[in-house]
Amino acid sequence: MDIIMDVQGFKIENNKFIVKEFAVFDGVKICHFIFKPPFPLNFLPPNLQKQADWLVRNFHCLEWKDGFIPLHQFRNILKKLSDGVDLIHIKGKEKAGYIRWFTSVPVVEFDEQPILQQSEPQCFYHMNSNSMCSLNDVFICIKNEFVSFHS
């Protein structure tokens, strides 16, 4: 079985990516998660606070403080969702590298083209914004048949 996933997040020190939003589709079920921050925003250096603010205003529109799930649970969630999976599909080299860090399941990345566009929201966190949403990105990849799911 294959799954398709997407992540949105922030960069912290040493160019490290932290996941904020995570969506997964297995051909039948879809899961969507928003993670709590690992620490208060003011713990970041000023340049990374500005970058986070730009992402909130212009890209994924998820506030640093948003989330219900502790970030340390990401690995466990990914492990559970990828149990018995043959391939994980994800769009983007950086996102694929991030997911590879947490799993031994082979990760296949989609081409960077066509670029996923900001679109109408699909989740409650993005109801009032035109933003990049992991849940919506998964739907777009399915709609554009980046991955075919077979019974």
Image: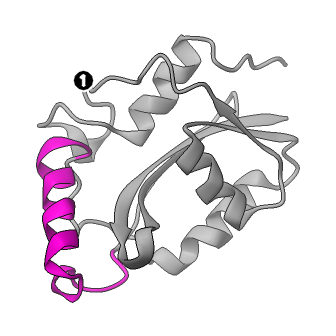
- Residue nearer the viewer, 42 or 1: 42
Q: What range of the chain is rendered magenta?
A: 37-60
Position of 140 relative to 76 (above/below): above
Name the quadrant containing residue 118: top left
**How is the model colour-coded?**
one colour
In this rendering, does residue 37 appear at all? yes
Indicate whether residue 48 is drawn in magenta.
yes
Position of 52 relative to 85 (above/below): below
| Figure quadrant of the N terminus | top right
Q: Residue 113 at what x, y percent from top left?
A: 50, 19
Q: Overall secondary structure of the magenta stretch?
A: helix
The crowd level at tag 1 (other Cα within 10 Å; few <14, some 14-19, many 20+) is some
Q: Would you name the residue on which mark 1 appears? A: 120
Q: Residue 70 at what x, y percent from top left?
A: 44, 78
Residue type at mark 1 is: Glu
- Residue depicted at x 21% and y 62%: 52
| Figure quadrant of the C terminus | top right
Name the quadrant containing residue 119: top left
Position of 13 relative to 148 (above/below): below
Side of 107 relative to 25 (left or right)? right
Q: Residue 78 at what x, y percent from top left?
A: 66, 60
Side of 53 relative to 142 (left or right)? left
